[in-house]
């Protein structure tokens, strides 16, 4: 956990945008040669594939609670407390009991991170309610636009530098993900009113836009913290602390919603007596996979989404918000393939083309990063004096 930040993060006197530009040059220079960045990619793959599949299984086998599905997307944050405590013990052994800081976050960073956490909770809610009213095809088109929103907000907030390869990747990934949505026709589901359909459309688009804002906001908060004199260096331990705060704020947001909407209790009347029982055990008794399958599925969903968020924030720390958006978008067709395997959903030529475009965009981005890194190393290499004219 005590992994130090790349050099640009330790430049305390730089401005946030300049610091972010330096991070793009150093951290993003050789992305696949950083083992911790690769580990975060693996976390994103596991979370992006496992989370939606488990959540889809929840609804397929009888689950109906949208607030609960929103809650599960961040409820796994306590899993990060154990490595954080181990990191604190390591700092205390290294720096001494009195010098070791219990928390690395400053009050200003804590407030900014809590705000991002509330945004995350709202994003989860918008996504859950949008999925309740939209067909899969339409929601796929709208969710795929998060990459475009990420690119736009990254340009505005952290001055993300675009190359021809990164622009090509954004276009290919967006088109490939949108093709998945156009595959099914996208009409209004039976039983959904026109007003509900319109609300679901707006909520899903809002979720994509909000998530596109959250990624650069996370990168900007790290850059501003690094530029503040006297603040602790932005290390991976600090990133995990931020993820705990985000998870806590988002989970509290969803828990309040569950309380307000009576997800924890149901009421029934027998004669003159009012009987109150918990709604979640009631749903577990009627679940298609049984009580054990129900709770295992809920716990697995929370763990998978925690892997996704931790990997995403790690990709931002060691790469950029745009890099995280690119990886998330390329995983959309991968999730579709897994849905075909596990849920026997149809897979036709359109989905195959979408998968090919997404992989092309993914390769384009990393090829561009490799070319940029090569050009930078050549420009920084000192001239060979043996080949100079006398």
Image: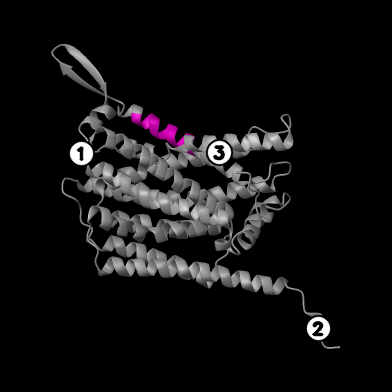
In the image, which residues are magenta? 247-258
Residue 83 — which label? 3
Q: CA distance from mark 2 to mark 3?
A: 52 Å
Residue 35 shows in this picture? yes
Task: Give the mark nearer the N terminus: 1 vs 3.
Answer: 3
Whether residue 355 is situated above or below residue 319 in the rendered picture: below
Q: CA distance from mark 2 to mark 1?
A: 76 Å
Which quadrant of the view contains residue 99?
A: top right
Query: Which residue was labeled with disc 2?
Result: 386
Measuring from the top left, give residue 33's x and y in whole percent: 58, 62
Whether residue 280 is situated above or below residue 56 in the rendered picture: above
- Residue that lies at the very extreme toward the right in this rendered image: 390
Query: Which residue was labeled with disc 1?
Result: 288
- Residue that lies at the very extreme toward the bottom in this rendered image: 389
Q: Is residue 223 magenta?
A: no
Name the one closer to the observer, 162 or 74.
Answer: 74
Name the one closer to the observer, 278 or 127.
Answer: 278
Residue at the spot 55% in from the left edge and 62% down from the top edge = 32
Residue at the spot 36% in from the left edge and 49% down from the top edge = 50
């Amino acid at each position: 956990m005590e992994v130090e930040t790349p050099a640009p993060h330790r430049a305390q006197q730089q401005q946030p945008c300049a610091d972010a530009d330096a991070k793009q040059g150093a951290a993003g220079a050789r992305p696949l040669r950083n083992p911790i960045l690769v580990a975060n990619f693996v976390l994103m793959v596991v979370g992006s594939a496992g989370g939606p599949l488990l959540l889809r299984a929840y609804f397929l086998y009888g689950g109906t609670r949208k607030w609960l599905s929103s809650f599960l997307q961040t409820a796994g944050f306590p899993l990060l407390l154990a490595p954080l405590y181990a990191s604190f013990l390591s700092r205390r052994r290294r720096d001494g009991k009195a010098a070791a800081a219990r928390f690395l976050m400053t009050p200003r960073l804590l407030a900014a991170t809590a705000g991002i956490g509330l945004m995350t909770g709202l994003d989860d809610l918008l996504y859950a309610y949008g999925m309740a009213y939209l067909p899969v095809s339409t929601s796929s088109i709208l969710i795929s636009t998060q990459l475009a929103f990420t690119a736009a907000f990254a340009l505005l907030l952290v001055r993300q530098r675009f190359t021809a390869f990164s622009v090509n990747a954004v276009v290919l990934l967006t088109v490939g993900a949108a093709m998945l949505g156009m595959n099914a026709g996208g009409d209004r589901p039976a039983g959904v009113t026109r007003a509900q359909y319109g609300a679901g459309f707006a909520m899903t688009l809002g979720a994509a836009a909000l998530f596109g804002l959250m990624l650069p906001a996370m990168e900007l908060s790290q850059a501003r913290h690094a530029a503040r004199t006297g603040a602790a260096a932005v290390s991976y331990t600090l990133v995990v602390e931020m993820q705990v705060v985000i998870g806590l704020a988002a989970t509290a947001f969803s828990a309040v919603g569950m309380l307000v909407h009576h997800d924890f209790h149901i009421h029934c009347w027998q004669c003159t007596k009012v009987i109150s029982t918990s709604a979640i055990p009631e749903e577990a008794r009627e679940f298609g996979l049984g009580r054990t399958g129900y709770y295992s599925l809920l716990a697995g969903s929370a763990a998978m989404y925690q892997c996704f968020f931790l990997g995403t924030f790690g990709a931002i720390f060691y790469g950029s918000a745009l890099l995280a958006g690119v990886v998330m978008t390329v995983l959309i067709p991968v999730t579709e393939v897994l849905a075909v395997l596990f849920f026997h959903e149809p897979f036709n030529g359109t989905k195959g083309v979408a998968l090919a475009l997404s992989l092309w965009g993914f390769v384009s981005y990393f090829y561009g990063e490799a070319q940029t890194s090569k050009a930078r190393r050549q420009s920084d290499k000192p001239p060979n004096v043996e080949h100079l004219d006398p």
